[in-house]
Image (cartoon, helix red, strand yellow):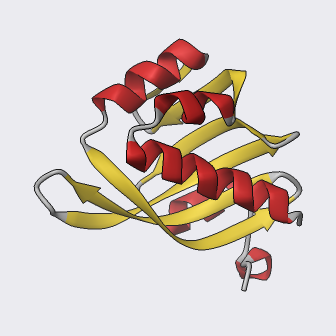
Amino acid sequence: MTTSEMATVLAWHDALNAGDVDTLLSLSSDDIEIGDPHGAAQGHQALRDWAEKLDYKLEPGRVYVHDGVVVVEQRVVSVTGEAGPGASAFRVVHDHVTSMFRHDDLDAALAATELTDEDLVS
């Protein structure tokens, strides 16, 4: 594990939640892939479109890291203040997020990435 992978993903969350799309793009590769169980898109324009339409914040919780893969447990908070569980799996290469996939919960994200409790950053 490198602290830079985790720091990149946490900075990515900060930029997303602050609505700072320029910083979000600077932390992401040009060909970033973003997705969820309903579909995926690729590139900076797709990330910009997604971030600008986002009507919730992703508050990071526990972080799991292994070989460039970072899974973040999240509290998803809507604009109405309602909150629920979530998690995202990231791939980080050279301090840039190359992919981000949203999952409904931590178990789904860990299963998709094959990360385990041994990968939890304490």
Report x, y in % for residue 12.
59, 47
Q: Nearer the viewer, residue 37 or 55?
A: 55
Work out which quarter of the rendered image holds the C terminus and state it. Answer: bottom right
Report x, y in % for residue 82.
16, 63
User: 63 above or below 31?
Assistant: below
Q: Nearer the viewer, residue 86 or 3?
A: 3
Report x, y in % for residue 103.
47, 52
Q: How many discs appear?
A: 0
Look at the image and tell me whether residue 6 can be seen: yes
Q: Is residue 110 left or right of residue 36?
A: right
Residue at position x 54%, y 27% from top? Answer: 22
Report x, y in % for residue 102.
49, 46
User: 24 above or below 77?
Assistant: above
Residue at position x 84%, y 51% from top? Answer: 68
Q: Is residue 93 left or right of residue 60?
A: right
Q: Quadrant of residue 42?
A: top right
Q: Nearer the viewer, residue 91 or 39?
A: 91
Residue at position x 78%, y 74% from top? Answer: 119
Look at the image and tell me whether residue 112 can be seen: no
Q: Is residue 95 left or right of residue 60?
A: right
Single out the residue that lies furthest toward the left: 80
Q: Nearer the viewer, residue 87 or 78?
A: 78
Q: Is residue 82 left or right of residue 21?
A: left
Work out which quarter of the rendered image holds the N terminus and state it. Answer: bottom right
Residue at position x 40%, y 31% from top? Answer: 51
